[in-house]
Amino acid sequence: MKVNTRWHSARLRQDIQVVRWGFAGVPVLLFPTAGGDAEECERFLNALLSICTHPDVFTHAICMSGTFDLARFLPNAQSQDMHFI
């Protein structure tokens, strides 16, 4: 079940597209990338989409987009074999 609607944001002073998939289970809040929209996750096969389409396998996820320096969080795990996608 997919519900696509618009909601007026008084702070942004514009209508915002809001999409809801399903009607039960743990809620998931998705934020589109810069320049994206609420249905962006349907058009790109990525890690978050893979996790969201298999709720029987995954219960939690931390997904980041953009460029981040995670060295301070992983000080002893740096090697040539480590890749961030």
Image: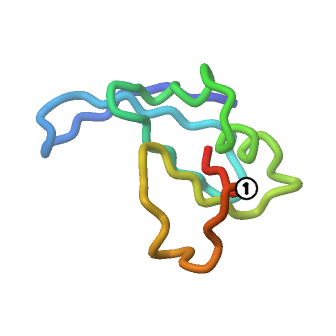
Query: At 40% from the left edge and 26% from the top edge, which residue is drawn?
Result: 36
Whether residue 2 is situated above or below residue 20 in the rendered picture = above
- Horizontal side, residue 83 vs residue 75: left or right: right
Give whichever of 83, 15 is nearer the camera.
83
- Horizontal side, residue 15 vs residue 4: left or right: left
Count numbered badges in the picture: 1
Give whichever of 28, 82 is nearer the camera.
82
User: Which residue is the extreme one toward the front?
Assistant: 80
Give the residue pinned by disc 1.
Answer: 81
Quadrant hosting residue 80: bottom right
Position of residue 19 measured from the top left corner of the image (x, y, whole percent): 50, 32
Provide the secondary structure element on which disc 1 rests: loop
- Point out the image quarter for the C terminus: top right
User: Which residue is the extreme one toward the bottom?
Assistant: 76
- Point out the image quarter for the N terminus: top right
Circle 1 residues within 10 Å: few <14, some 14–19, many ≥20:
few
Position of residue 27 measured from the top left corner of the image (x, y, whole percent): 61, 55
Whether residue 43 is situated above or below residue 75 in the rendered picture = above
Position of residue 53 measured from the top left corner of the image (x, y, whole percent): 77, 40
Q: How is the image coloured?
A: rainbow
- Horizontal side, residue 45 vs residue 14: left or right: right
- Horizontal side, residue 80 vs residue 34: left or right: right
Query: At 65% from the left edge and 73% from the top edge, which residue is drawn?
Result: 77
Quadrant hosting residue 41: top right
User: For the residue marked with disc 1, what is the amino acid?
Assistant: Asp
Position of residue 9 measured from the top left corner of the image (x, y, whole percent): 21, 40
Give whichever of 35, 82 is nearer the camera.
82
